[in-house]
Amino acid sequence: MAGRMEVDAGKPTLSLICPRCGKWFASAMQTDPKTFATVRLKGIPERCGTCARVSRFDKDDYLFR
């Protein structure tokens, strides 16, 4: 399906919760937890795969699932 990200079931997926619909979705930015720990993020726009809302997220909003 166009616009949907494929994720590897064996690896943790960097994910967010949509503030509009409350559903989990995979971040457009995928990396491993060790690398993610070294980056600085603030106000990164991401689009929910369920409701298509674009929201800004800070590093604390991202979780590996």
Image (cartoon, rainbow, N blue to C red):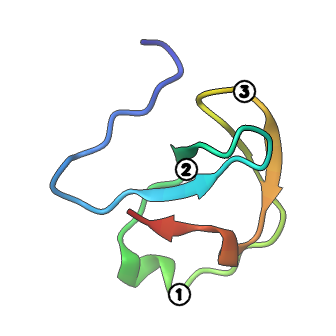
Which mark is drawn over residue 38?
1
Residue positioned most to the left: 10
Q: Looking at the image, which residue is at 53% across and 44% down?
A: 25
Can you identify the residue that label 2 sits on?
27
Crowding at mark 2 (Cα within 10 Å: few <14, some 14-19, many 20+): many
Q: Secondary structure at mark 2?
A: loop
Crowding at mark 3 (Cα within 10 Å: few <14, some 14-19, many 20+): few
Q: Is residue 5 above or below residue 46?
A: above
What amino acid is at disc 1?
A: Thr
**In front: mark 2 or mark 1?**
2
Q: How many marks?
A: 3
Residue 2 in the image: state x and y as whole percent: 49, 13
* Residue 43 position by quadrant: bottom right
Mark 2 or 3, nearer chain start? 2
Q: Are marks 2 and 1 in contact (CB under 8 Å)?
A: no
Q: Looking at the image, which residue is at 43% across and 33% down?
A: 5
**In front: mark 2 or mark 3?**
3
Which mark is drawn over residue 25?
none
Residue 22 in the image: state x and y as whole percent: 67, 46
What amino acid is at disc 2?
A: Ser
Residue 59 in the image: state x and y as whole percent: 68, 75
Q: Are marks 2 and 3 in contact (CB under 8 Å)?
A: no
In the rendered view of the protein, which quadrant contains the C terminus? bottom left
